[in-house]
Amino acid sequence: MARRGRNRFPFVLANNWFAGCPWDAVVIDNAAGVTLALESLFKWGHQQIAFIGGPRHPSILERTATYEKVMQQHGLNPRIIPASGLDPQDGECAVDELLRSSADATAILCANDSQAIGAMRRLKELGHAVPEDFSVIGFDDIHMAELTLPRLTTVRVDRRTLGRIAVELLSGQLSAPERPTVKSIVGVRLIERDSVARPRSNE
């Protein structure tokens, strides 16, 4: 593995990593999170599942790539709706595009919770019910996810653990500056609330 230079100031990448990265990093298991979300939707009976993407950040790119891979593994057509950002208004704009290009979708997986909150708000404005017409799943489990109506099903990220591991990696660098670099992956889990139900009929 790559090694830091002896005089390099110690630091750790948090929720950021790239192939060949020469620095310690602690990252979220994005692939597991997206897979858990999709498997839950499959169990509910969904097959027409859209994904709202986002900017070219390593975590978002990994979530997008995993969505596409898992859908293809199940013989399903990926439906990626591009978004320039990760804010509620980006989720709202993505819903407008989804209804134009993939109106037969019955579920929406979002790159993060803020997008999902915006998506649910826009769906409601347009007269669509969540989860009766569209199931929605977010990612991150921010505080607002439990306060939405309906409460948002999402992938929980343990940011306290992420921060603790980052500090431990920094401490390790100080005590052993010539050790190999470390990439630590923090697990996730699906928090099932009220924004997912069986798919509506498209007939």
Image (spheres, rainbow, N blue to C red):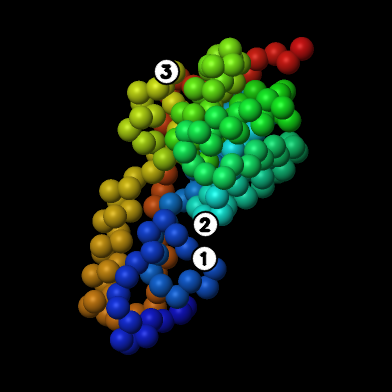
Q: Please tell me which residue is depicted at 54% across the width and 16% down the height of the picture.
A: 125
Residue density around tag 2, few if under 14, some if 14–19, many if 20 or more, within 10 Å: some
Residue density around tag 3, few if under 14, some if 14–19, many if 20 or more, within 10 Å: few
Q: Please tell me which residue is depicted at 41% across the width and 56% down the height of the picture.
A: 15
Kind of residue at badge 2: Pro
What residue did someone put label 1 on?
18
Query: Looking at the picture, does residue 29 appear above or below residue 88?
Result: below
Q: Nearer the viewer, residue 108 or 191?
A: 108
The image quadrant that residue 145 belongs to is: top left
Measured from the top left, where is residue 194 in percent x and y?
A: 45, 20
Q: Secondary structure at mark 1?
A: loop
Q: Nearer the viewer, residue 22 or 114?
A: 114
Q: Are marks 3 and 2 in contact (CB under 8 Å)?
A: no
The numbered mark, 1 or 2, whose residue comes first in the sequence reads 1
What residue did someone put label 3 on?
149
Q: Please tell me which residue is depicted at 27% across the width and 69% down the height of the picture.
A: 170
Q: Are marks 1 and 2 in contact (CB under 8 Å)?
A: yes
Measured from the top left, where is residue 172 in percent x and y?
A: 27, 72
What residue did someone put label 2 on?
58
Image mark for residue 142: none
Q: Secondary structure at mark 2?
A: helix
Measured from the top left, where is residue 42 in percent x and y?
A: 62, 29
